[in-house]
Amino acid sequence: METSCCCGQYPLREIIQPIVERNGRDPSMLIQILHETQEAMGYLPQDVQQCIADELKMPPAEVYSVVTFYSRFTMTPKGLHTISVCLGTACYVKGAEAIIEKLKKTLAVGSGQTTADGVFTLDICRCVGACNKAPVVYVDNDQHEFVTPELMVEILSHYRDDQEYSAAESIVDPGLPEQEEAQL
Amino acid sequence: MNGISTYHENTGFGARPLYARPMTSTQLKALAAAATDHPAKDLGSDHPSIEKQCRIALANCGYIDPERIEDYFDAAGYFALDKVLEQYTPRQVIQIVLDSGLRGRGGAGFPTGRKWLFAHEAPGYKKFVVCNADEGDPGAFMDRSVLELDPHAVIEAMAIAAYAVGADEGYVYIRAEYPVAVKRLNKAIGQARDYGLLGHDILGRGFNFDLHIRLGAGAFVCGEETALLNSVEGKRGTPRLRPPFPAIKGLFEKPTVLNNVETYANVPAIIRRGSDWFSSIGTDGSKGTKVFALGGNVVSGGLIEVPMGTTLRQIIFEIGNGIPDGRAFKAAQTGGPSGGCIPAEHLDTPVDYESLVRIGSMMGSGGLIVMNEDKCMVGIAKFFMEFMVEESCGKCTPCRLGTRQLLRFLEKITRGQAEMSDIEAMESLAETMRSTSLCALGQTAANPVLSTLRYFRHEYEAHVRDKRCPSRDCKFMARFVINDNCKGCRKCASACPAEAISGTAKKKHIIDGKLCVKCGACLESCKFEAVDKEW
Ligand SMILES: Cc1cc2nc3c(=O)[nH]c(=O)nc-3n(C[C@H](O)[C@H](O)[C@H](O)COP(=O)(O)O)c2cc1C
Ligand code: FES
């Protein structure tokens, strides 16, 4: 496991070293370091964790234990856009579950999963602190308020158009009945 | 920041030297003397029924520009810190907080002054103050608003707390879901340092204090104080065994005061206006005001601040303007996942720490979710239990396994597969969890179940005995049937993901209830209104 972070896949140390440096090489800053690394890399695979552990001179198991504990850290890459549906109490009471059902059908993924083409990741989060505008859905960093299942499908299409994404079929499992909707 | 420089503010009366860096005590006093209770300009206060409220923690929110420390100065900002450093010994500060009757706004309601006193008396040179801005209660956003709209109040209060207990370093632990709050607080800390209100020799009175921000990473249990301390140290956020309490052995094993954002936000006003003023508001056991995040099925939701002892009816029907769409009130949920559901018969309960506990809920951090008659109470209990299963940190067995077992029971009930004995089993399991879990998360995890069982037992019984959801909310209790409108077009059969629909073309189809997964695809796909959803 010695130098797996220099495997050449990414210039790992070049990304991680400055982050660790900026945080004073302080093991108590681990969570901050992981946040910044994930921001830069998109996710925290094993070799990244190993590299951070090396830099901080701590056992990789300890880094792993922290990464797996907190739900905001992920060891698998996310899609181009991350959809986070709030399932806090206020949003639940205002019908967030129907939005999630709709998304699951439309995108043919479960929560935490990414569509086969890597465009959307469906996530569930617990209260983003905008409860008076429930139900709330975040797509990347944009907050969408008072969302309904129908509106959600429309919102998706914006993000899809945004990057001239046209192959709607590939998002939807052809076996599912919701194709018309997905082609909006 | 080298030497005394002067910041010229163009006021329209020509430039006048007003905000000096570092800020001096004399200038703060002059500004405080000129300050009015409510600064005149309203930058968009958020709630329609603001005149029915009483604002202490939220006093500045919406009235000052949170990114300008000068605005905070104009609202008597940092005057309390100056007053404390000039006039009081640490012990006197603690006495004022004790006399005010301020109790923690983060959940348990522990008297803040007592906490400070323990930390003050704890031996050791190095001590910490910590602010809990994790706000894990899903459905609450009081702390977010205070940090975003009045960050300096928290900084000032933490400096006061640090002076009182003898700390020179503080941490604010904010959940990563609040990027704007983090940004504003960061900016505010920078400004406070710039004005010499954080750092070395604050206001020239020989007091040192500096503040750091730590981000959470999505774990509800990190709101629990000892788990939070572990997380600040960069570790897994699992709770520690108490005692020793953080006031004796907290962050990095040093005596630590840990308070909630809203608790801190009350402190500058208490110092400025005195403990008598504060303790004149509220009820006997619960002084001051409480901020609630009013949400759910209510007309005017949003942040509200009311004196302790205001009744739920006043909050929901006078301030919140009642339930929308002509629906009836069914329950109010307070205390988040550790709290409970309060039925209509207790609407006149005054909201304070003791009264809420007496009716099987708790104050919690201030989420107040109103539910109308369409919400199934078993469904709500199941919703919270799903949350708890996800968020149980796994360190102790009663919580880790107990939450899963309870969820399994609730799933059985909402699917109509449970027996009456399951309800008793749930009650006994809840008692085991309460008495044997490591931290309050596990100890209170069953509260949503217990409180709904207490007030809405008939709903549980309808699910179990009659296999029926009286609120028509539980998806698995519905039955889909095809009526005589059916033309036999096969559309529903091809839409059904479970292949539960059979029948030949042009003849009426039937749905096999055993195979049906209740997704409603048939109902959506039918063009002839031939599918009925029955309860
Ligand atoms: C599971 C759990 C979650 C908690 N979440 C929070 C929270 O999000 N915010 C908070 O201020 N206190 C939370 N608390 C309460 C804290 O443990 C602690 O009592 C509080 O921050 C102390 O501050 P106070 O005295 O000012 O209320 C939580 C407690 C438990 C057991
Ligand atoms: S519950 Fe969804 S934003 Fe708070």
Image (cartoon, rainbow, N blue to C red):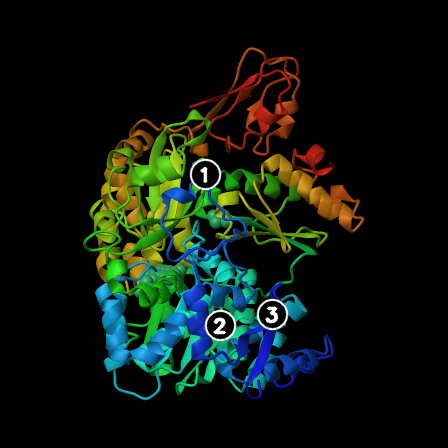
Position of residue B254 measured from the top left corner of the image (x, y, whole percent): 33, 82
Q: Name the residue that disc number 2 marks.
A: B214
At x 32%, y 89%, the residue is B125
Q: Which residue is most to the front?
A: B13
Query: Which image quarter is the N terminus of chain A in?
Result: bottom right
- Give, as a three-letter code, the residue at label 3: Glu
At x 37%, y 42%, the residue is B52
At x 50%, y 55%, the residue is B63
Q: Chain of mark 3?
A: B
Does residue B94 lie above or below B285 as drawn? below
Q: Nearer the viewer, residue B269 or B123?
A: B269
Q: Name the residue that disc number 3 marks.
A: B9
Q: Chain of mark 1?
A: B
Position of residue B80 measured from the top left corner of the image (x, y, whole percent): 37, 71
Q: Are marks 2 and 1 on the same chain?
A: yes
Ligand 1 under 8 Å from disc 3 Cβ: no
Q: Secondary structure at mark 2?
A: strand
Work out how far the residue at label 2 is from the one at label 1, CA to CA, in angstroms.
Answer: 34 Å
Q: Name the residue that disc number 1 marks.
A: B300
Query: Which image quarter is the C terminus of chain A in?
Result: top right
**B500 left or right of B525 in image:** left
Foreground mark, 2 or 3, reads 3
Position of residue B249 measured from the top left corner of the image (x, y, whole percent): 30, 79
Q: Is residue B234 visible?
A: no
Query: Total marks drawn?
Result: 3
Mark 2 or mark 1, earlier in chain: 2
Q: Nearer the viewer, residue B448 or A147?
A: A147
In the picture, residue B271 is in which quadrant? bottom left
Foreground mark, 2 or 1, reads 1
Q: Are marks 1 and 3 on the same chain?
A: yes
Mark 1 or mark 3, earlier in chain: 3
Mark 2 or mark 3, earlier in chain: 3
